[in-house]
Amino acid sequence: MTDDQFTQAANWDFPVPIKYGPGRLAEVGALCAGAGCRKPLIVTDRATAKLSFVETLRGHLEAAGVAHGTFAEVSPNPLDVEVVAGKATFLAGGHDSIIALGGGSGMDAGKAISLVLNSSRDLWDFDYNLSPPAELGKADFVPLLCVPTTSGTGAETESTAMITDTKRGIKGCVWHPAQKPFAALLDPELTIGLPRNLTAWTGCDALTHAIEAYCVPSFHPMCDGIALQALGMIYRALPKALDNPASIPARGAMLTGSCLAGVAFLKGLGMVHAISHMVGAEFDTQHGLTNAVLLPAVLRFNAAAIGPKVAPMCQAMGLAGSDFETFYAAVCGLLDQCGIPRSLAEIGVTADRIDSIAAKAMTDTAAGTNPRPFTLAEMTTLIKQALTNAR
């Protein structure tokens, strides 16, 4: 792909309508009006709510004659009680649709709120591990527009959302297959002001999505192809975005690669995410950063099980070699460029919670699709290693 391609507008219809291009936030009013949204609720996190493009978004809605409101009481790791509060705000304001805006936290909260608006169902009735409520169909969910402002989560094409269960102290995934965004709006200009550390952490999140999705052992050639495309794109573009943060081609490649990786992980994820979700629930760590710290230790653990996958990943990344050590060294080199710490202890994780994290991680959906089966003892040992020496 050429740099010029990422400076131009493009429309894709898979897996949902995607509107890509610099400056396309200006189309948000027309998109909402075309979907019959008369009064959307913008859902975002507290930090994003303070950024200038939120006011720009409101201006575009007003110019199109679309009334709106905002709910921004969302934590970096969204809580189930915040979803309940968001539903109350939606109903009190007479809203009819959701604009989920932000990184993973804003989009996850917006998507989770959209699941519970038109039924008496509890949020956790939509737990990914359960059969989805069968009585609910597409007409039971409000229109949902996703607008990512980071290049990491890739959450903009599905209803899946990671939410912290405040009673059980875990992060769980909620969704419904009938609820999908009517569009995803990918505007790389929204990511230009992202600080270097968040560019790195969210970029490593996308990198982990691509690697873990590709390494899931089930047969899914469509997701595998998408994962490899995402991996190559992210590996090349992330250093450029760090070195030249105003580069639209670099930011565009990262935003596109992140979206692709998000599509790929419909196949599943792995041990990195199983642990990271529970570390986030216990210590409120930034998700992409936690993934990045854990990734090398999990790659080492999975090395024997992912042997046939290594050469295609090396090829996608443009590496000279095709063996595991070449692949592993390239991943660790990128993490070093991103300034990723080398231990969980450096991001605030303490030894007294290892057993709790390991036990909870065993129940995570991503644990079941890791390429190498593992026991609780092996999970605990890996977390202990990552506490002091993750790479």
Image (cartoon, helix red, strand yellow):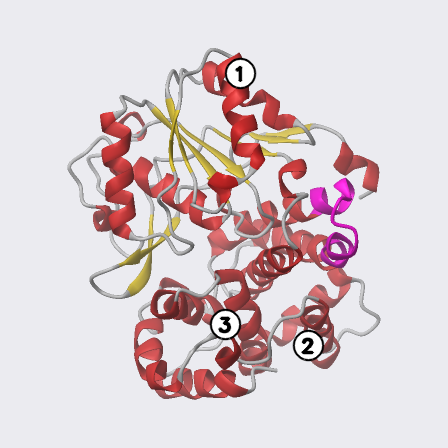
Q: Position of residue 86 (x, y in %)?
A: 29, 38
160 w.r.t. 11: above or below: below
Magenta stretch secondary structure, dominant = helix
Check disc 1 and report the residue beneath it: 30
Marks 3 and 1, how far apart at CA: 44 Å
379 w.r.t. 47: above or below: below
Marks 2 and 3, how far apart at CA: 16 Å
Check disc 3 and report the residue beneath it: 371
Q: Quadrant of residue 76?
A: bottom left
Element on which disc 1 rests: helix
Closest to the observer, 215 or 172: 172
Q: Amino acid at mark 3?
A: Pro
Disc nearest the viewer among 2 and 3: 2
Tell me which numbered mark, 1 or 2, is placed earlier along the sequence. Answer: 1
Q: Residue furthest left?
A: 120
- The verdict on residue 83 being magenta is no
Element on which disc 3 rests: loop
Q: Does 12 sit left or right of 131 as displayed?
A: right
| Magenta region | 236-253
365 w.r.t. 384: above or below: above
Q: Quadrant of the N terminus?
A: top right
Q: Does 229 sit left or right of 35 as displayed?
A: right
Q: Quadrant of residue 185?
A: top right
Q: Position of residue 192 (x, y in %)?
A: 68, 43
- How many marks on residues? 3
Q: Indicate which disc residue 109 carries.
A: none
Residue occupying image coordinates x 76% and y 73%: 322
Q: Amino acid at mark 1?
A: Ala
Check disc 2 and report the residue beneath it: 328
Circle 1/circle 2 CB separation < 8 Å: no
